Image: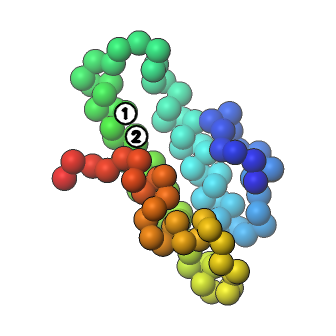
Amino acid sequence: MPPFSLAGFTDEYLIDIQELDEQHRTFSIFSKNRCHGIRFYKPLDDDEVDDVIDIMSELREYALLHFRTEESYMQETAYPASPNRSRHTTGSSPMSSAWKPNS
């Protein structure tokens, strides 16, 4: 699978597992739509910072849901173990530690 891009979802990302393909498509569309209006080349005011925090929280929650779905699929199909699989379940993936809410 090619690296994720905000340019949009393409057939290159399809893995022929409908639920996971839909989640990949949704994640791509969400990311593109929500991140489109943010201008990171200038200082952000407080409202813009709050918007970025909200977006990051939503992306994190969706990614965690997606990883749980992938893990479930791997268990159901006895998918062979891989380094990424253990990163999902142990929480050592970059996504699990990159941003955590202050609560």
Instruction: Give the left or right position of residue 81, taking residue 95 as reference.
Output: right
| Residue at figure coordinates x 62%, y 86% from the top left | 76
| Residue at figure coordinates x 68%, y 33% from the top left | 7
In this orientation, which residue lies closer to the viewer: 4 or 81? Answer: 81
Q: Position of residue 37 (x, y in %)?
A: 48, 24
The reply to whether residue 16 is in sight is yes
Distance between the alpha carbons at the discs numbered 2 and 1: 5 Å
Task: Say which amino acid is labelled 1.
Answer: Val
Q: Which residue is identified by label 1? A: 52
60 is higher (above) or lower (below) than 87: above
Q: Position of residue 36 (x, y in %)?
A: 53, 28
Instruction: Give the left or right position of residue 71, taking residue 40 as reference.
Output: right
Circle 2: element type: helix
Task: Say which amino acid is labelled 2.
Answer: Ile
Q: Position of residue 62 (x, y in %)?
A: 47, 56
Instruction: Give the left or right position of residue 99, taking residue 93 as reference.
Output: left
| Residue at figure coordinates x 40%, y 40% from the top left | 55
- The disc label shown at residue 55, or none: 2
6 is higher (above) or lower (below) than 64: above
Mark 2, Cα crowd under 10 Å, few <14 / some 14-19 / many 20+, is some
Instruction: Give the left or right position of residue 38, taking residue 72 as reference.
Output: left
User: Residue at the top extreme?
Assistant: 42
- Check contact, mark 2 vs mark 1: CB within 8 A: yes
Residue 4: quadrant of the picture: top right
Q: Position of residue 19 (x, y in %)?
A: 64, 68
71 is higher (above) or lower (below) than 12: below
In this orientation, which residue lies closer to the viewer: 8 or 103? Answer: 103
Circle 1: element type: helix
Quadrant in the picture for the N terminus: bottom right
| Residue at figure coordinates x 69%, y 81% from the top left | 79
82 is higher (above) or lower (below) than 6: below
